[in-house]
Each structure stands twice: as structure tokens, then as C-alpha cells.
Amino acid sequence: MGDWQKILEAQPVETSAPCRIDMGGTLDISTFYYPLRHLHPCTVNMAIDLRTRVRLWPYRRGLVKVSSKGFETAEYPVEIAPFDHPLGLIFAIAANFRVEGVHIDIDSQSPTCSALGGSSAAGVALVAAFSKVLEKMAVKPLSRQKIALQAHVIEASVAGVPCGLQDHLAAVYGGVNAWYWPGSLQEPLFKKRPIVRKQSLKGLEKHLLLAYCGVPHESKDVNSKWVQQFLSGKYRGLWAEIIACTHEFIEALTTRNINDACACMNRETAIRRKMTPEVLDEMGAALVEVALKNNCGVRFTGAGGGGCIWALGDVEDVDKLKRTWEVMLPTKEGARLLDAKIDSRGLLCHSAI
């Protein structure tokens, strides 16, 4: 194991990665895409320029210290660092790289536990930061794809529930992409299809709205229920409908048919509410209701159960909805509109601060 403290004393490291909004989520979990592979499962995500930043500083030898907005700072020797801690994912990644003598400082522009893929973005940024330090120890740096895969397998190993990959891919690659999950040993694990060109992202932003409901989410609760339902044979026909909705959404967004894209979003949201009504809290349900009345497509982010709601629509409809949401959100402590600018850069690494 190299001298992490000494290297970081000479040159601290900073990395950052974006969060995401999504459509068709859950289908990036192998529990779903293997048995449904004949339907060509796919998901969509848009990287949002609410970035999670990771900085590595030198610290006392033998210890790993982690500080992150929204969590109590913790430090442990890497050999006994708890992976079931609120910051367990960060300690698990540090243990994987045999890190010690490091202070990991995490700062996210998104609300804590907002269902925007923040934990995956933090994992991606941290793996990239460690890879940057290892370069100074003459270790070959990880590619973007390997950074995403490394962050995913570690998160999946400590999450306690099946864990998808699409959040890590959004954090690494940025942009607006469809991800296909072949579920075949003869094909790559995933296939990437950009569906909005970089020069068109600014135009798409005018059609988007993103709100935080003021309630942190716990994705494993809803995800666990979906997994258990699926394993028992329940609602598999509805998951087939979700796949169809996602395919149609991809084609609608590719051709800039906003109205059709909105219809696909609303069908998918209705299906998921049928399977798990708890995907929307009280504020989320109210935001969805007014979005529908304003001819917009609307969906919770991630697995719902709190967190964020995002909307899509014609510019006039979105502007009208924004004014309504601006009146509704202050009635809930912490609830607010978030900046829905699309990130085209993905993972960023900086050699020094």
C-alpha cells in the first residue's frame, strides 16, 4: 500500500460527478432484465448539473475520515470501518482501495437523500479520485467505464438490496442517454444510446422542471418491494408495460415529440403508483396532480418514496406549472425548485485544488 498521506500532502485531489433524473428505472437491475430480456429492457437518464464533489486531503496515518453535508463526520481505521454506517459506502470504497491517512470531504449540490442518484455520483467521484492518486503510485488509471463498474459493484455489495448501474453511468458519462440491458453473456453488459445531442441540451432544458419535495427518500424500501413482487411473479405484465413505455419515450424524445414523451411518462408513473402507492408522498402526489392538469409529463426520480419530482412539457405549459409549484412548495419545510440544467460533461477529475 502506497503512502496516501504523503502523496496528498504534495497534491490534494478533487473530482466531481453529476446527479440525474430518470425514466424506466429499476430495469437496470439484473433481477428484472435477465428474465425480461426478450422485451429489450432499457432505461433513460438525464445528467443534471447538481454535482457531487469529492476532495481528498492528507490525514492522520492509519485512519480514514469522512465528512459529508447532511451527515455526521466519522473516522475509523480502514480495517474496522463499518459498511452499515450512514457513510458506509464511502468507507467500503476506501477499504477496497486499502486507503489510510486520508480525509474524504464530500459536498453535494443536491439535497441529501433526494433520489437523484447522489450516492452513486459520490461513489463514482471517489473511485475516480482514488484512481488519480494511484496514478502517482505507477498504477494504471481506471477508464470511465471501469470507474462506473467499480463504484457499482462496491455499492451493490453493501446496499443490502439489488442495485442498478444506470446512476453510475449517468455520473460518468453525463448527457441524455438511453441504456439497454441485453442480459446476455454474448453481448456487453449495457449499450449506450445518446438521444439528445450536446448542442440541443439547452433547448431541452426549457421543457424541464425539477422539484424537491422536502422529504428524504429511502430507495431500498420501494426497491425491495418491487423486487419481492417481481420474484413472486406479481405484476410482471406491468413491468412489460413499463419497458414499452420507456421504448416509446426514447423514440418520442429522439424526435422531439414532447407531447408523446409526456404521455409515456404519465403512463409509467400511473403503473408504478398501482404497484406501490407509497412512491409518492403527500407533496409529491400534489405536484403530480397539478402537472397532469397542466398537460405535462411527470415522474418521481429514482424509486420515489420522497425525494424529487420532475416534469416535462411544452415551454408554455412548463412555465405555467413552475408558477404553480412555486406557490405549493413553500408550504412544506425544505421543499423547493431545483436547477434542472443538463450536464454534458459527466465525471471531472482535477489533479490539484
Image: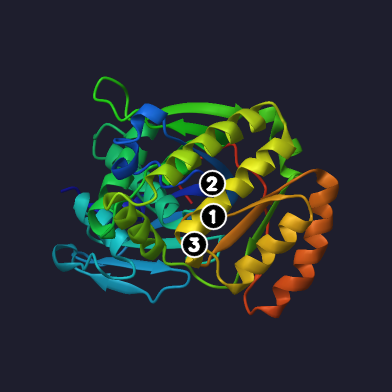
Q: Nearer the viewer, residue 126 or 211?
A: 211
Q: Earlier in the sequence, mark 3 or mark 1?
A: 3
Q: Nearer the viewer, residue 282 or 349?
A: 282
x and y, in percent, of residue 271 in the image:
52, 51
User: Mark 2 is on which residue type?
Assistant: Asp
Residue that label 3 marks: 107
| Label 1 close to label 2 by CB (< 8 Å) | yes
Label 3 or label 1, whichever lies nearer to me, is 1
From the viewer's perspective, tell me whether residue 301 is left or right of residue 86. right
Cα–Cα gap, marks 1 and 2:
6 Å
Residue that label 1 marks: 301
Query: Mark 2: which secondary structure?
Result: strand
Q: Residue at x 36, y 40 (%)?
A: 148
Residue that label 2 marks: 22
From the viewer's perspective, tell me whether residue 285 is left or right of residue 257. left
Q: Nearer the viewer, residue 245 or 163?
A: 245
x and y, in percent, of residue 230 in the image:
32, 50
Q: Earlier in the sequence, mark 2 or mark 3?
A: 2
Label 2 or label 3, whichever lies nearer to me, is 2
x and y, in percent, of residue 304 in the image:
50, 61
User: Mark 1 is on which residue type?
Assistant: Thr
User: Mark 3 is on which residue type?
Assistant: Asp
The number of numbered badges drawn on the structure is 3
Q: Residues within 10 Å of mark 2 (few under 14, many from 20)?
A: many
Cα–Cα gap, marks 3 and 1:
21 Å
